[in-house]
């Protein structure tokens, strides 16, 4: 699974991307966020308030209950506003 981090999420995690193999019980975006939170202090800080982070699975906006799979690309980013 390829995980991408953008904007302040990237700053807190300390890297722009990583390739990981989460355990089988990680089946959706919320489970992935929970698992990632335990990886490092930076991850914990980035995901401390999950409602402040948006996700995309394979470049499609995703909800916390959206499924994730081994070969997916998951991106995490702050909410975006237009003007």
Image: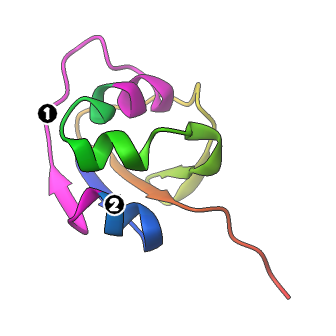
Look at discs 2 and 1 and give the one toward the viewer.
2
Q: Earlier in the sequence, mark 2 or mark 1?
A: 2
Against 35, is 47 above or below?
Answer: below
State the residue at coordinates (63%, 49%). Answer: 52
> Which of 10/23 is in front?
10
State the residue at coordinates (32%, 34%). Answer: 37
Q: Is residue 79 left or right of residue 46?
A: right
Image spot of residue 17 (x, y percent): 22, 63
Image spot of residue 16 (x, y percent): 25, 69
Circle 1 — which element? Answer: loop
Q: Which region of the structure is painted magenta? A: 13-34
Image spot of residue 81 (x, y percent): 77, 74
Residue under pointer 1: 21
Q: Quadrant of the N terminus?
A: top left
State the residue at coordinates (38%, 26%). Answer: 34
Against 13, is 83 above or below?
Answer: below
User: Magenta segment: does it hold 6?
Assistant: no
> Which of 12/81 is in front?
12
Q: Is residue 30 left or right of residue 26?
A: right
Q: Residues within 10 Å of mark 1 (few under 14, many from 20)?
A: few
**Extreme residue in the top direction:** 25
User: Magenta segment: does it hold 31?
Assistant: yes
- Marker disc for residue 43: none
Q: Quadrant of the C terminus?
A: bottom right
Q: Residues within 10 Å of mark 2 (few under 14, many from 20)?
A: some
Residue under pointer 2: 12
């Amino acid at each position: 699974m390829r995980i991408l981090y953008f904007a302040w999420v990237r700053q807190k995690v300390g890297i722009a991307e990583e390739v990981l193999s989460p355990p089988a019980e990680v089946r959706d975006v919320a489970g992935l966020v929970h698992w990632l939170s335990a990886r490092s202090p930076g991850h914990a800080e980035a995901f401390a308030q999950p409602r402040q982070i948006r996700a995309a699975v394979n470049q499609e906006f995703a909800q916390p209950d959206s499924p994730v799979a081994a070969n997916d690309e998951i991106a995490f980013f702050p909410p975006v506003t237009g003007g």
